[in-house]
Image: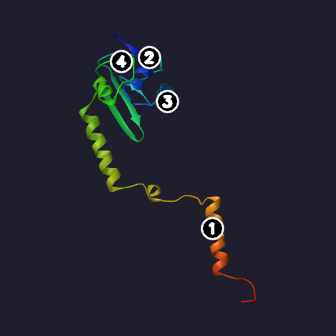
Amino acid sequence: MEKMRIDKWLWAARFFKTRVLATEELDKGRVQINGHNVKPAHDVKPGDMVQLRQGRIPRTVKVRGLSLQRGPAPVAQQLYEETADSLALRAQLQEHQRLHPEPADTIEHGRPTKRDRRDMSRAWDQRWSASLDD
């Protein structure tokens, strides 16, 4: 096999959990081959450079092999080789995130649930009384 669809390769190399997710990222222009935006049906072959983003982390990988089936992670990692620049950028971004965490990530609890609001209401009623009987 000399070439295959990019959406299938991204799925087989375990960059995306499903082919649908890979196709959506390709349609949004978040994946490039050799610097060009491509459609999901575009062919990829060994030696091509693929630029993509996983979450907040941009990655640049060189295609080393092709596979029609999705295998275990160690096998999938043999399908590509990440560039040195990409590894350095990823390490730099991880260090930046460690030193400057997102403030919203420290929020432990979101909006209270209905049960939480009822419990708060009961606690309020027990602590305070508006009646004159006390």
Tell me which amino acid carries mark 4: Ser
Q: Earlier in the sequence, mark 2 or mark 4?
A: 2
Badge 2 is on which residue? Answer: 42
Q: Earlier in the sequence, mark 1 or mark 4?
A: 4
- Mark 2, secondary structure of its residue: loop
Badge 3 is on which residue? Answer: 21
Marks 1 and 2, how far apart at CA: 56 Å
Image position, residue 41 (x, y; %): 47, 16
Marks 4 and 3, how far apart at CA: 18 Å
- Mark 3, secondary structure of its residue: helix
| Number of numbered markers | 4
* Foreground pick, 71 / 44: 71
Tell me which amino acid carries mark 3: Leu
Q: Is residue 25 left or right of residue 35?
A: right
Determine whether 89 is above or below 101 in the image.
above
Badge 1 is on which residue? Answer: 119
Q: Earlier in the sequence, mark 4 or mark 3?
A: 3
Give the class, few, some or many, for how many residues have Cα within 10 Å of label 1's Cα (few <14, many ≥20).
few
- Mark 4, secondary structure of its residue: loop
**Residue under the point 48% across and 25% down:** 19
